[in-house]
Amino acid sequence: MEIVIKPTRYGAPSAQKLIAELFDDLTARYGSGDATPVDPMQFDPPDGGFFVAYLAGEPVGCGAWRSHNGSEKVAEVKRVYVAEKTRGQGLARRIMATLEEDARAHGRTRMILETGAPQHEAVALYESLGYERIEPFGFYKNEPDVRCFGRDL
C-alpha cells in the first residue's frame, strides 16, 4: 500500500487522533505527555505546517513545524509521530523530508527540534538525517534528558 502525506490543520480529527497516540507514547516513556505550550494556529502556513501520513485512508503518522520565536528563518519541528504498526518502514524519515521541504518553501533556512534521551529511536533518526546537538532550548531546556538538535536546510 502507498503512504500519502497531506497538509492538515492541527485541529483536524486525524491530527488529534495521532497527537493523542503520541501523548500516550510519551506518557509511557516519561510519565506524562508533552506540556509545551502550543497554539494550533502556529502550524498554519506561512508560519508553520502540519502533515498527516495516511495508509489506505487511515492516519498512521504526523509531523509539524512552526516558526521558532517568530523567526522567518528558523523552523521548529514538533509532533513527529509514527503509529506503532507502521514503524520501521522509513515513514518518520519521509515525514521529516516533508517538513523540511515545506519549511524551506516558506523561507526557513534552519530546522531545530527538542526531544528526550528516552526517545532513542528519535535521537538516532535525527542524527542519521544530519542533525547535530545544539544548546537546549524550549519548555524542557533545563531537564537532564532533553536533547536538542539543529540542521541548516
Image (spheres, rainbow, N blue to C red):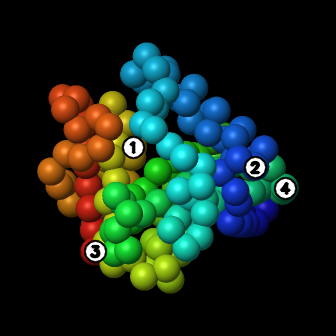
Query: Residue, x 47% and y 73% (percent of image)?
Result: 103
- On residue 12, the disc is 2
Task: Please give the label number shown on residue 121.
Answer: 1
- Which mark lies nearer to you, 1 or 3? 3
Which of the two marks, 4 or 2, is nearer to us in this view?
Answer: 2
Density class for disc 3 (Cα within 10 Å; few <14, some 14-19, many ≥20) is few
First-in-chain label (2 vs 3): 2
Name the amino acid type tagged 3.
Answer: Asp
User: Against 117, is 123 above or below?
Assistant: below
Can residue 79 be seen by looking at this rendering? Answer: yes
Dividing the picture into quadrants, the one containing residue 43 is: bottom right
Which residue is situated farthest in the left direction here? 135
Query: Who comes first in sequence, dot 1 or dot 3?
Result: 1
- Give the quarter of the figure containing the N terminus: bottom right
Q: Earlier in the sequence, mark 3 or mark 4?
A: 4
Q: Quadrant of residue 37?
A: top left
Of the residues tagged 2 and 3, which is closer to the observer?
Answer: 2
Report, in whole angstroms, how far the alpha carbon at label 2 lies from the one at label 1.
27 Å
Which residue lies under the disc numbered 4? 57
Disc 1 to disc 3, how far (Cα)?
21 Å
Q: Quadrant of residue 94?
A: bottom right
Q: Secondary structure at mark 1?
A: helix
Q: Is residue 153 visible?
A: no
For image coordinates 49% across by 27% down, the residue present is 33
Looking at the rendered image, the quarter that the C terminus falls into is bottom left
- Residues at marks 2 and 1 touching, judged by CB atoms closer than 8 Å: no
The three-letter code of the residue at mark 4 reads Gly
Residue extending furthest toward the right: 57
Q: Residue at x 34, y 42 (%)?
A: 115
